[in-house]
Amino acid sequence: MRDLSSARKLVMVLGPTEIEDDVLALGAMPQQYNRTQEFSLFLGRVFKNLQYLFQTEMPVYVLSSSGTGAMECAITNLLSRGEQALYVNGGTFGKRWGDLCHKHNVIAEEIVLPIGTSVSCHEIERRLIANKNIKVVFTTLNETSTGVLTDVRSVAAVTKKYGVLLVVDAVSALGVEEVKMDEWGIDVLLTSSQKALSLPPGLGFIAFSEAAMRAAEKSNLRIFYFDIFEYFADWKRNQTPFTPPISLLYQLDARLEKITQETLQKFQERYLQLTMRLRTGLRSLGLHVAGNPLANCVTGVLAPEGVDASEVVRVMNEKFHISIAPSPGDLKTRLFRIGNFGNISESDIDYCLASLKETLIILEKEKNL
Ligand code: PMP
């Protein structure tokens, strides 16, 4: 059992996550000069393991940014002012694609989904037939605000058919969901460090297909810090264009080595078992797990009738020292979310479920006061 006090929470949000002590300790290792042969050798291993994670032969670039930086990197390299894109808005993070497009003067068509549902590839095909000027489709693998998964493989078959580029935000999914960048024909795939990779926040990762690199040559939105050709030039010599967060790279290396040794498939299965344990437990408490199809490690739970979901989050935090996530916007009072990314054990899940049961009893009593 963990030692939980008000200063030490059990973190079961959707990132950041619980991190094992050995990986945490690597963050305190002495710094070293990054422009050396030795460091290039080390980065070469990291780069190779990232290709395994992304299931690609293309370079995977390491950005000093959070996930949104990687999203901005995708847009600014692929498109030019006044060009057209399509994005899927299934919640907070899908909507962010639209915000980024508007910021960069890209004309963005939106597919708005009813909350808790996934995009149909027929709808994407319909939009691409109706508007031949769409150059890029932006999607979200796991819409973290609801925990709903996109069938990216089928979407990729459609974008390929129409010669349109497909960008996939896999910030809350890469690692714990099956994604095959090259085989499925994804053009840009991106993620960040603080979710399935269970590292501190601060690193973004992005890979471009050959078609995406060709599009980048024509973009007039490319900005200095995220110019993909700068990253490519340095990637070839196992370096990064700008000083990377070296401590995070030590931790990344350890994580990728662990995943590679375990294999991606076993890593995913292990997390799926924990996710299922959580969902089975939630249902046995009479709670409704929301959304369909659901992503691994992210579970949206509807608060029971008459209970405010944000109160559940508060009591879990104050009384049981567990951080679970509230929901954004209109869902705030209806849905709370539980994550099991990172160093979460079966007994953590059981403790979370037992605490939730107590929390609901406490809230019921408060209601009747
Ligand atoms: N996309 C998705 C699917 C996310 O879950 C998040 C973070 N919750 C982001 C993008 C944004 O990432 P960051 O906060 O690291 O910028």
Image (cartoon, rainbow, N blue to C red):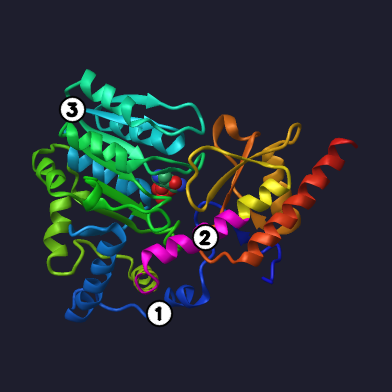
Mark number displayed over residue 17: 2
Q: Secondary structure at mark 3?
A: loop
> Residue visible at 24% across and 72% down?
43
Residue depth check, mark 2 versus mark 1: number of the one nearer the observer:
2
Residue 81: x and y in percent read: 18, 29
Residue interval drawn in magenta: 260-277
Q: Which residue is mark 3?
A: 83
| Nearer-N-terminus badge (2/1) | 2
Residue 103: x and y in percent read: 30, 32
- Residue 76 in magenta stretch: no
* Picture quarter with the C terminus: top right
Q: Which residue is mark 1?
A: 29
Q: Amino acid at mark 3?
A: Glu
Name the quadrant containing residue 329: top right
Q: CA distance from mark 2 to mark 1?
A: 21 Å
Q: Secondary structure at mark 2?
A: loop
Residue depth check, mark 3 versus mark 1: number of the one nearer the observer:
3
In the drawing, does residue 354 fall left or right of residue 108? right
Q: Nearer the viewer, residue 288 or 66?
A: 288
* Picture quarter with the N terminus: bottom right
Q: Secondary structure at mark 1?
A: loop
